[in-house]
Image (cartoon, grey):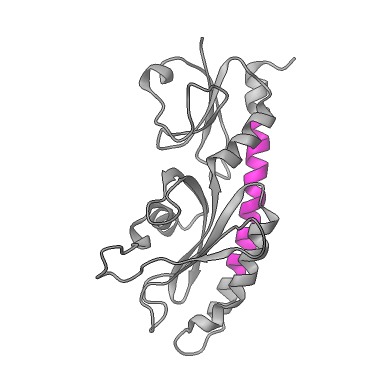
Amino acid sequence: MDTVREALERTAGIVSSSINAVFADLEKIAQAVAEASASLSGEPQRSEFLFLKREFADFIRKHSDLIVGGGIAYAPGTFPEAPFWLEWWRAQRTGDPRFVTHDLNPDSLNYYDYTSREWFTVPSSSGQPVAVGPYVDFGGINVSIITLCVPVSTPQGMHILGGDLTLANLEGVFLRALQLREPVVVLLGPNGRVIASNSARIATGILLQETDLQRAETEVNVSSDDLPRLPWKLISLAS
């Protein structure tokens, strides 16, 4: 029988492998965006990136066990006809993913300022792929999600590609990998919010209480030191 540390290390490996497969396909799309941007002559037009609709439809379908949506947020000022432009698609029960409409008018009461969202600012600043969240995507799908973000540097600025995964989908991967009922184990995000746990008392999306943190016994990082795109940790709690 595995020790608790061995179970946590196995779980970290399985979770990391599952998420990195999604990152790998996002990075392929990012490369296509970089090549398309570099080949442009004159001002970019949105029509020159129409190929992304099919790319993201295939991406969302391929990773439907984890991903519920994805798309691209363009650097402000990329397109002369639309200073702010965001293209995002949401998975449907049948058929192609649905385009999600956002209000991108800064003068509107319902303005969705994606440039201020953590999933845009963090990878824009670091220039590195990263998982952001969990957070509630108000103005988006209004549920607690994690966004896997891949920045792509272009002559027009830094665009951000993303894939949204729900905590429910990720919790399934976590529980199948962990295979432990005791002790209590928590997958924790960098903001102190619970991504998953094997305890009904510790719900996904909540801030882990200080009293629980004080009971932490074994801790394992999900990401390796040379690939810190998953800033999560697994912790076991003393009973």
Q: Is residue 208 above or below residue 166?
A: above
Q: Position of residue 122 (x, y in %)?
A: 41, 53
Q: Residue at x 57, y 39 (%)?
A: 168
Q: Could one spot residue 45 in this view of the protein?
A: yes
Number of marks drawn: 0
Residue 34 vs residue 111, the one in the foreground: 111
Q: Is residue 70 above or below residue 81?
A: above
Q: Position of residue 67 (x, y in %)?
A: 60, 51
Q: Is residue 85 left or right of residue 218?
A: left
Q: Residue at x 45, y 46 (%)?
A: 143
The N terminus lies in which quarter of the figure? top right
Residue 173, by quadrant, is top right
Seen as rendered, the residue at the extreme right is 1
Q: Could one spot residue 224 in this view of the protein?
A: no
Seen as rendered, the residue at the extreme top is 239
Residue 231 vs residue 146, the one in the foreground: 146
Residue 57, by quadrant, is bottom right
Q: Residue at x 65, y 20 (%)?
A: 180
Residue 177 vs residue 166, the one in the foreground: 166
Q: Start and end of the magenta stretch?
A: 11-32
Q: Position of residue 59 (x, y in %)?
A: 65, 60
Q: Is residue 108 magenta?
A: no
Seen as rendered, the residue at the extreme bottom is 42
Seen as rendered, the residue at the extreme front is 94
- State the predominant SS element of the stretch in magenta: helix
Q: Is residue 196 above or below residue 82?
A: above
Residue 178, by quadrant, is top right
Q: Position of residue 141 (x, y in %)?
A: 45, 53
Q: Residue at x 60, y 63 (%)?
A: 97
